[in-house]
């Protein structure tokens, strides 16, 4: 996939769209002609090193920052011309938690409910419902500054939900969380998606995003390198697949010999890029670098079986999101 290309799902309406979105800070180019589409109902992981342009993009989409050039729309509203409508459609959770001292959790939500101009009669029930959603009902009267980092993040997420936005934009929400808090956050985001929310989430914790996201975008130095659903990105950015083959250990004249026989059968076949026999590993196995489609994979397995190779395991090794990220980016930070 070439730089800046996308693999977005055109069958679903985009709740976020940018065209040529550019932002400069003096001589520094923070965003360079960003073309992005986020389908409605997605959990969109925005991945990039520090200084890549993630927060700048999010601040533009939430109308906290104007673009230097280009345009962006949220729920069909321009972030330049329809700022009030965009703010009604978006709930933004920044990467820091700001609150007055000695404020209780319920008071925190009450304060923002008033800021969102929610009718006073609606606020008590709404606050109770949101605290229940983020599993903080038992902390309703607790002081916010005494909450754990994970609880503060969940309370901040409840705050973004007060005005029932269609889109949640979360900047590094898993930063600083312990493993249990990350799991709790991940499950909460899945629940919010089931409720019909679209979620854009930035992070450098790539394994966390791989487990929760339906779509991803990879950005570096202000340039969007890839964007689309996770399966498509993984498929298009992998130059080939690696298949692992194991055979019966008690076969005659031995597993190693059977693997060598299998290797001789597949070497030179169409789409086979390389073959490695690893008889000393446990269990002994063979690896095949392969760039064919699923039909070609089936043909390769059929060739082994027809030759009487006692195959007990034939499976592709899954590349993870972190491997894809490292392959696509150049590792420039700052």
Image (tube, rainbow, N blue to C red):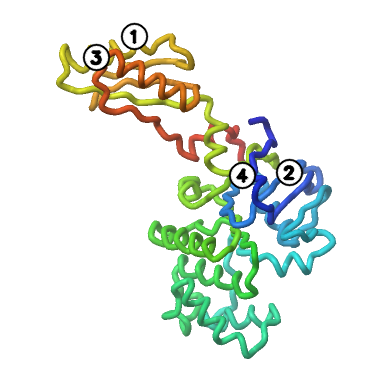
The label shown at residue 300 is none
Tell me residue 3's x, y (percent).
68, 33
On the rendered structure, is 63 left or right of 302? Answer: right
Mark whose residue sits in front, 2 or 3: 3
| CA neighbours of label 1 inside 10 A, class few (<14), some (14 to 19), many (20+) | few
Tell me residue 40's x, y (percent).
64, 56
Please tell me which residue is depicted at 29% across the width and 13% down the height of the picture: 307
> Is residue 64 shown above or below 32?
below
Q: Which residue is mark 1?
A: 264
| CA neighbours of label 3 inside 10 A, class few (<14), some (14 to 19), many (20+) | many
* Inter-mark Cα distance, 4 to 2: 11 Å
> Is residue 131 shown above or below 281?
below
Please tell me which residue is depicted at 24% across the width and 22% down the height of the picture: 247
* Inter-mark Cα distance, 1 to 2: 47 Å
* Inter-mark Cα distance, 4 to 1: 41 Å
* Inter-mark Cα distance, 2 to 3: 51 Å
The label shown at residue 217 is 4
Please tell me which residue is depicted at 47% across the width and 61% down the height of the picture: 185
Q: Which residue is mark 3?
A: 258
Marks 4/1 in contact by CB < 8 Å: the verdict is no
Q: Which residue is mark 2?
A: 35
Mark whose residue sits in front, 1 or 2: 1
Quarter holding residue 86: bottom right
Quadrant placement of the N terminus:
top right
Along the line of sight, the residue nearer the viewer: 331 or 117: 117
Along the line of sight, the residue nearer the viewer: 303 or 216: 303
> Is residue 331 shown above or below 241?
below
């Amino acid at each position: 996939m070439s730089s800046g290309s996308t693999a977005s799902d055109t069958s679903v309406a985009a709740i976020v769209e940018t065209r040529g979105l550019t932002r400069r800070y003096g001589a520094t180019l923070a965003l360079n002609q960003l073309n992005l589409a986020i389908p409605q109902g997605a959990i969109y992981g925005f991945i990039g090193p520090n200084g890549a342009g993630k927060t700048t993009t999010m601040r533009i989409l939430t109308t906290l920052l104007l673009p230097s050039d280009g345009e962006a729309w949220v729920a069909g509203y321009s972030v330049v011309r329809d700022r009030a409508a965009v703010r009604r459609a978006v709930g933004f959770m920044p990467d820091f938690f700001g609150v007055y001292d000695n404020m209780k959790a319920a008071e925190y939500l009450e304060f923002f409910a008033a800021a969102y101009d929610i009718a006073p009669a609606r606020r008590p029930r709404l606050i109770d419902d949101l605290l229940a959603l983020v599993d903080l009902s038992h902390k309703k009267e607790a002081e916010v500054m005494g909450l754990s980092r994970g609880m503060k993040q969940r309370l901040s997420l409840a705050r973004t939900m007060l005005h029932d936005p269609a889109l949640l934009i979360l900047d590094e929400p898993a930063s600083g969380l312990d493993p249990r808090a990350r799991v709790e956050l991940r499950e909460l985001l899945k629940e919010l998606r089931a409720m019909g929310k679209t979620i854009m989430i930035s992070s450098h914790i790539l394994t966390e995003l791989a487990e929760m996201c339906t779509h991803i975008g990879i950005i570096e130095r202000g340039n969007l390198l890839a964007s689309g659903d996770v399966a498509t990105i993984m498929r298009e950015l992998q130059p080939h697949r690696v298949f692992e083959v194991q055979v019966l250990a008690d076969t005659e004249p031995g597993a190693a010999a059977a693997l060598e026989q299998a290797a001789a059968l597949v070497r030179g076949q169409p789409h086979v890029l390389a073959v490695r026999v690893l008889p000393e590993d446990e269990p002994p196995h063979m690896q095949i670098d392969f760039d064919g489609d699923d039909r070609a994979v089936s043909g390769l397995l059929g060739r082994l079986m027809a030759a009487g190779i006692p195959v007990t395991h034939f499976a592709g090794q899954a590349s993870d999101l972190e491997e894809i990220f490292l392959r696509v980016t150049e590792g420039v930070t700052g």
